[in-house]
Image: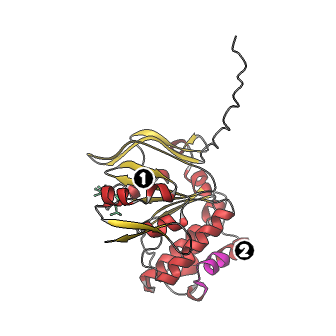
Amino acid sequence: MSRPSRVAAPAPAAAPVLAADGVTVGYRDRTILEGLSLPVEAGTITALVGPNGSGKSTLLGALARVLRPRRGAVLLDGASLAELGSRQVARRLALLPQSATVPAGATAWEVVEQGRFPQRGAWSMLRRADDPVVAQALAVTGIEHLAHRRVAELSGGERQRVWIAMAVAQQTDLLLLDEPTTFLDVRHQLDLMRLVGTLRERGVTIVMVLHDLNQAARYADRVVALRDGAVVADGAPADVVTPALLADVFGIDAVVTPDPVSGRPHFHAR
Ligand SMILES: Nc1ncnc2c1ncn2[C@@H]1O[C@H](COP(=O)(O)OP(=O)(O)OP(=O)(O)O)[C@@H](O)[C@H]1O
């Protein structure tokens, strides 16, 4: 018979909404991630950082079911992604990939509208009801004025905002962003980070690959550093963005000071 404990049981940790559970992922004969686990809590912003080739996009691809793990599983609310239908996954999870094919001739509005397809039934056409959602996605990414321009003819930063708007229009509760600030000028980088913050306040869970460590430290709740396909640091920005990590993972001699605006760690290379 078990004796009643006098010690209060710790509050159970919230179940992760999305979790890599011992995943091994690779390309042809190369293994990139081996037995990697990463649970992601609902309503948080996680930044994946690490040197080029460390496996950040590979991990994001596995979390988005673009890449199938050879071993282990990615769990969405505890269910294996591999066992869910594409539409089921697309209703829950939107991915902004590192690069996307530009559809010939399509306008920004038409591309962003494609974000609505997963929310429709199998054979139904887009409904007028989707128009406000598309318009809103264009507005929050600041590209209303580009709605009727061909995406193929837009600048890199304008096009990047079209892809972001498409992911936003999908209205999922999970958003996976691979280097979302690529091509964006400083003002639009700020706008994007604020948009990500607003979405998080609405309960959206965000995982994003960021190259800018200062940006990761400022805007993420959790920073996960990868090196050679393994997680080498994982925690609050103040615990991860440290001189030791910068030296060890990035080979940078740096000082870290509190950012005067946010109080978050901010590194300066010597
Ligand atoms: N389609 C592919 N086929 C074969 N190898 C690949 C493929 N994509 C990535 N790799 C390899 O997998 C490793 C991890 O790449 P990945 O793109 O995940 O790294 P990353 O951390 O996102 O890099 P970066 O910061 O340069 O974007 C690299 O060695 C890369 O060459």
Does ligand 1 reach within 8 Å of label 1's beta carbon? yes
Q: Height in image: 191 above or below 8?
A: below
10 Å neighbourhood of mark 1: few (<14), some, or many (≥20)? many
Q: What residue is shown with label 1?
A: 59
Residue 115 visible, this angle: no
Q: Quadrant of the C terminus?
A: bottom left
Residue 249 visible, this orientation: yes
Residue type at mark 1?
Leu
The secondary structure making up most of the magenta span is helix
Q: Quadrant of residue 219?
A: bottom right
For disc 2, the marked residue is 128
Q: Is residue 3 left or right of residue 167?
A: right
Question: CB under 8 Å between callouts 2 and 1?
Answer: no
User: Who comes first in sequence, dot 2 or dot 1?
Assistant: 1
Look at label 2 and name its amino acid.
Arg
The stretch drawn in magenta includes residue 139: yes
